Amino acid sequence: MVDKSFKIPLITLDNLKQGTFLNRPNRFSSTIKYKNKIYSAHIHDPGRLNELLIENSSVLFTESNGKLDFYIKAVKKDDEWVLIDTALHSRIALAVFKHVDDFKSVTYIHKEVKIGNSRIDFTLDDTPLEVKGVTLVKDNLALFPDAPTKRGTRHVQEIIDHDGIVVFLVFRKAESFKPNWVTDRAFSNKLSEARKKNIPIYVIQLSFDGKTIFYEGRMPLSDF
């Protein structure tokens, strides 16, 4: 169980604005309301996010450098802000590494490394490490993925083949983690295989207060 009194600030997000989510015309775009006007906003998360992107939910966003007006960073679910910007995962992971004992002895880190037939997020002293973000929680259980992911399954296979590491960043409060068998049995089987082969699986509890991202320790794996 995560120690709820343990909280280390990692990253601060600046220039955030708050508005209201209206709808999601396609996977990477949404319509939001801000100061009584309607705008388009980019969503940098390929997941379904059905339990988060609900009409009239509050969202935090920044100016966009792309074609749309804004860029969504987080959505409010119950009493917590949930980060849904997957472009932040690499930056967050690098900040987390500094606080996990097993990674403190690493001498060099390379980003976006081609391993086998995939591009893996990091190598830590030649050990490949793949990062996945988790936003789906049911009954205090963090679940991944929230949509089928052939790419994710391929990444785990590469990690198995090259004796690597898998890291899950959990952006909502939960007690433990397991793969989402209902949504993606192939990924779940592959992660179960990785665990049986003693591939290290780290699950990291994070939180976001609307400005700062916090590291709250490691989360245990559920049975799978």
Image (cartoon, rainbow, N blue to C red):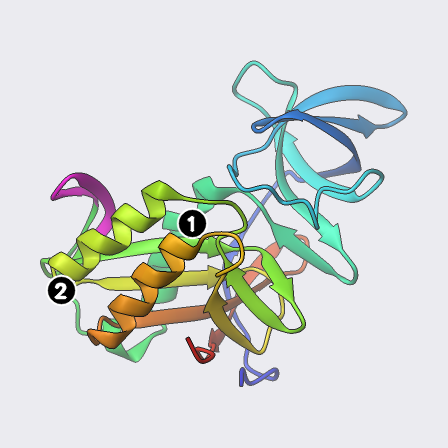
Q: Quadrant of the C terminus?
A: bottom left
| Residue at position x 26%, y 72% in the image | 200
Residue 81, how many percent across, how many down?
Answer: 69, 55
Determine crowd level at label 1: few under 14, some 14-19, many 20+ residues with C-alpha closer than 10 A. Answer: some
Q: Is residue 102 magenta?
A: no
Question: Magenta part of the protein: which range?
Answer: 112-122
**Residue 83 or 159: which is nearer the viewer?**
159
Whole-percent x, y for residue 24 in the image: 69, 29
Q: Quadrant of residue 87?
A: top left
Q: Viewed as shown, does residue 205 lie left or right of 90?
A: right
User: For mark 2, does the 10 Å Cα neighbourhood hold few (<14), some (14 to 19), or many (20 or more) residues?
Assistant: some
- Mark 1 belongs to which amino acid? His
Q: Where does the image place residue 146, in percent across and percent down from the top left?
A: 54, 50
Secondary structure character of the magenta stretch overall? strand
User: Height in image: 137 above or below 28?
Assistant: below
Note whether 49 is above or below 178 in the view shown.
above
The answer to whether 214 appears left or right of 20 in the picture is left
Task: Kindly identify the residue that appears in the image at 30 percent across and 60 percent down.
Answer: 190
Q: Residue at x 74, y 51 (%)?
A: 76
Give the labeled residue for mark 1: 89
Q: Earlier in the sequence, mark 2 or mark 1?
A: 1
Residue 167 x %, y %: 35, 63
- x 60%, y 84%: residue: 5
Using the image as rendered, state which of residue 26 and residue 45 is in the foreground: 26
Residue sitting at the far right: 36
**Between marks 2 and 1 in the image, the one whose residue lies nearer the viewer:** 2
Name the kind of residue labelled 2 in the image: Asp
The residue tagged 2 is 163
Secondary structure of the residue carrying numbered label 2:
loop
Q: Nearer the viewer, residue 11 or 215?
A: 215
